[in-house]
């Protein structure tokens, strides 16, 4: 079973193509995440007991804006539950301070349009290299290809960890459509396919039709139905979901389905 937990909705990025951003941290509204540590620890321990052979994918929002991500990682290590944290790789100090205390694997999504200090980002990639499982350079234009080339020397022989990945396409914005068309075209190009490592699988503008009629109540596809459970920040589980991208969660719940 694939287990995913969106531990918090807040993020320090505001990517236009992200289907999960839910406003800046501190916005007044319903509780966006479970604030009781003991409930979170019990939730994680229950997952370990129920799915002893499964890995937990922890994402957001941005997990490293979670007020007690350090305690979460410590507990996951304590109960010996396999996990990986997906991050936009920007909160270096907090990430490094945690790394001095706890081991944790990283999956990184790099957003070329939002990188403030490219040299510092590359330097930090080298620092965290042994803990990085995968790096996705989100394709928002040709600058993503340039960034990919700059990362390669940093990760050396670990090219298999580096991917060009398509951006989410839930809003169907014209600009994002153009990027996705370009991504698909480059991926099929025989030369580009040898130079760059593109994310496997297909993503198109009719990808809803590929989901065999499995839709959430919001009319969005359930791409992994029957294969995974997604948990929201309040520890509610869903086998089919599409989170509403509103400023607050409807009825204190962040997912529908």
Image (tube, rainbow, N blue to C red):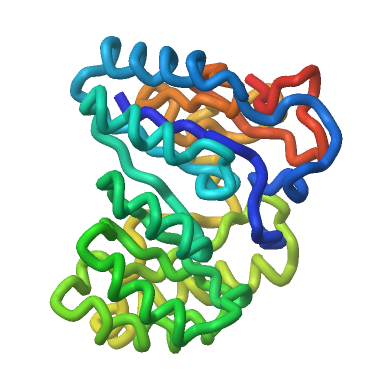
Is residue 120 positioned above or below 96 on the image?
below
Is residue 151 positioned above or below 88 on the image?
below
Is residue 88 positioned above or below 47 on the image?
below
At a point 71% along the width and 56% down the height, the residue shown is 172
- Direction right: furthest residue: 28
> How many badges with numbers are in the image?
0
- Relative side of 177 to 72, left or right: right
Depth check, front residue: 104 or 148: 104
Query: Which quarter of the picture shows residue 154?
Result: bottom left
At a point 25% along the width and 47% down the height, the residue shown is 103
At a point 44% along the width and 70% down the height, the residue shown is 137
Q: Residue 65 placed where, x, y %?
A: 58, 48
Is residue 21 positioned above or below 142 on the image?
above
Depth check, front residue: 4 or 105: 105
Query: Which quarter of the picture shows residue 225?
Result: top left
- Relative side of 157 to 77, left or right: left
Q: Residue 129 placed where, x, y %?
A: 25, 67
Q: Residue 1 placed where, x, y %?
A: 30, 24
Depth check, front residue: 72 or 160: 72
Q: Residue 194 placed where, x, y %?
A: 24, 82
- Quarter of the image with the C terminus is top right
Whether residue 248 can be seen here: yes
At a point 39% along the width and 55% down the height, the residue shown is 97
Whether residue 238 can be seen here: no
Query: Which quarter of the picture shows residue 36?
Result: top right
- Relative side of 233 to 118, left or right: right
């Amino acid at each position: 079973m694939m287990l995913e937990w969106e531990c918090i909705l807040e993020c320090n990025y505001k990517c236009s193509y992200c289907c999960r951003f839910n406003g800046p941290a501190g916005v007044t509204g319903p509780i966006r995440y479970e604030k009781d540590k003991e409930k979170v620890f019990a939730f994680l321990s229950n997952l370990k007991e129920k799915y002893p052979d499964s890995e937990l994918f922890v994402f957001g929002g941005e997990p490293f804006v979670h007020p007690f991500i350090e305690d979460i990682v410590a507990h996951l290590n304590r109960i010996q539950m396999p996990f990986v944290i997906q991050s936009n790789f920007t909160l270096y100090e907090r990430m490094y301070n945690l790394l001095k205390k706890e081991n944790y694997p990283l999956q990184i999504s790099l957003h070329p349009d939002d990188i403030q200090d490219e040299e510092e980002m590359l330097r930090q990639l080298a620092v965290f290299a042994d803990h990085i499982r995968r790096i996705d350079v989100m394709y928002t234009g040709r600058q993503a290809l340039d960034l990919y080339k700059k990362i390669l020397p940093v990760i050396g022989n670990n090219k298999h960890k580096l991917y060009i990945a398509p951006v989410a396409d839930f809003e169907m914005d014209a600009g994002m459509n153009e990027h996705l068309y370009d991504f698909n075209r480059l991926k099929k190009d025989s030369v580009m396919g040898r130079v760059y490592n593109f994310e496997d699988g297909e993503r198109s503008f009719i990808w809803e039709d590929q989901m065999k009629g499995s839709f959430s109540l919001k009319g969005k596809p359930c791409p992994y139905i029957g294969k995974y459970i997604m948990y929201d920040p309040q520890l509610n589980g869903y086998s089919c979901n599409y989170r509403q991208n509103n400023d607050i969660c409807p009825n204190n719940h962040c997912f529908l389905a």
